[in-house]
């Protein structure tokens, strides 16, 4: 296996070549929050119109993961249009949600999306130059390959996400998580990975419970 020259390239290969392409950078839960039964959770994506497919896929996957836990979860793309609350004040928006039986909202916000362009040299492995310095041809061929083999430019995309969970009864934030996604293979894989990651963290932090598991009655 060739040794890669440059820390940036090593990091890029690590994230794009193995393991998860999404990870949580920080998460928080209100101290007095414990798992409870929500009658209807709406998953609401806040993503630019140019990324509409991402918004819909993210909503669909995370709603599906919530349903797997036993919660009644729906996508805003199915319940409301992207501008459903445009022109409303706080009272009107909350009234609209509550009239639909919504008692919790989970937002998915794409805070930023950046592209990073980097150069990959044609020859990136290390060479023990001292073995060739005393012989012209060995030195010539080694340096010729390094200098004249063309490299190429590559572009990686990084997404910065934030999700907040609001309880409608008290109209307060009870959970928040920030995460990053690094050059996902597709919108589908990004959405699937993100949904599982966030819901798993909500269960871990006792914001939600897995209600799909059968409750064992005492003997």
Image (cartoon, rainbow, N blue to C red):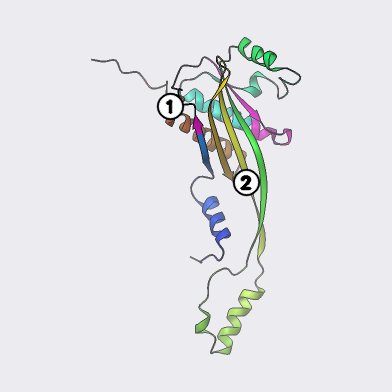
- Give the class, few, some or many, for how many residues have Cα within 10 Å of label 2's Cα (few <14, many ≥20): some
Residue 40 part of the magenta-drawn span: yes
| Position in image of residue 94 (x %, y %) | 64, 15
Helix, strand or loop for disc 2: strand
Residue segment shown in magenta:
28-55
On the picture, is 213 further left or further right than 106? left
| Position in image of residue 19 (x %, y %) | 48, 47
| Position in image of residue 84 (x %, y %) | 71, 20
Residue sitting at the far front:
31
Task: Name the mark nearer the viewer: 2 or 1.
Answer: 1
Which residue is rendered at x = 52% and y = 14% of the image? 39
Which residue is rendered at x = 50% and y = 45% of the image? 20
Q: Which of 176 and 218 is in front in this view?
A: 176
Residue sitting at the far left:
219
For residue 168, what is the image quadrant?
Answer: top right
Q: Is residue 152 above or below residue 106?
A: below
Q: Nearer the viewer, residue 215 or 98?
A: 98
Residue 158's label in the rendered image is 2
On the picture, is 209 further left or further right than 72? left
- Give the class, few, some or many, for how many residues have Cα within 10 Å of label 1's Cα (few <14, many ≥20): some
Residue 30 part of the magenta-drawn span: yes
Residue 206's label in the rendered image is 1
Which residue is rendered at x = 51% and y = 83% of the image? 130
Which residue is rendered at x = 47% and y = 33% of the image? 201
Disc 2 to disc 1, how far (Cα)?
Answer: 29 Å
| Position in image of residue 174 (x %, y %) | 52, 25
Residue sitting at the far right:
87
């Amino acid at each position: 296996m060739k040794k890669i020259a440059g820390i940036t390239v090593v990091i890029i290969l690590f994230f794009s070549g193995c393991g998860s392409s999404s990870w949580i950078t920080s998460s928080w839960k209100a101290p007095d929050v414990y798992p409870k039964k929500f009658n209807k959770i709406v998953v609401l994506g806040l993503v630019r119109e140019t990324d509409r497919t991402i918004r819909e896929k993210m909503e669909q996957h995370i709603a599906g993961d919530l349903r797997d836990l036993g919660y009644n979860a729906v996508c805003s793309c199915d319940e409301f249009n992207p501008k459903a609350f445009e022109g409303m004040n706080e009272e009107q928006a909350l009234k609209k949600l509550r009239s639909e039986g919504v008692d919790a909202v989970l937002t998915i916000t794409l805070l930023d999306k950046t592209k990073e362009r980097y150069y990959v040299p044609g020859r990136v492995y290390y060479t023990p130059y001292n073995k060739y310095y005393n012989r012209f041809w060995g030195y010539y061929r080694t340096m010729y390959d390094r200098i004249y083999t063309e490299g190429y430019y590559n572009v990686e995309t990084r997404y910065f996400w934030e999700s907040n969970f609001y309880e409608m009864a008290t109209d307060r934030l009870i959970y928040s998580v920030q995460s990053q996604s690094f050059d996902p293979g597709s919108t589908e894989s990004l959405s699937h990975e993100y949904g599982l990651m966030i819901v798993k963290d909500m269960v871990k932090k006792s914001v939600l419970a897995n209600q799909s598991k059968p409750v064992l009655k005492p003997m």
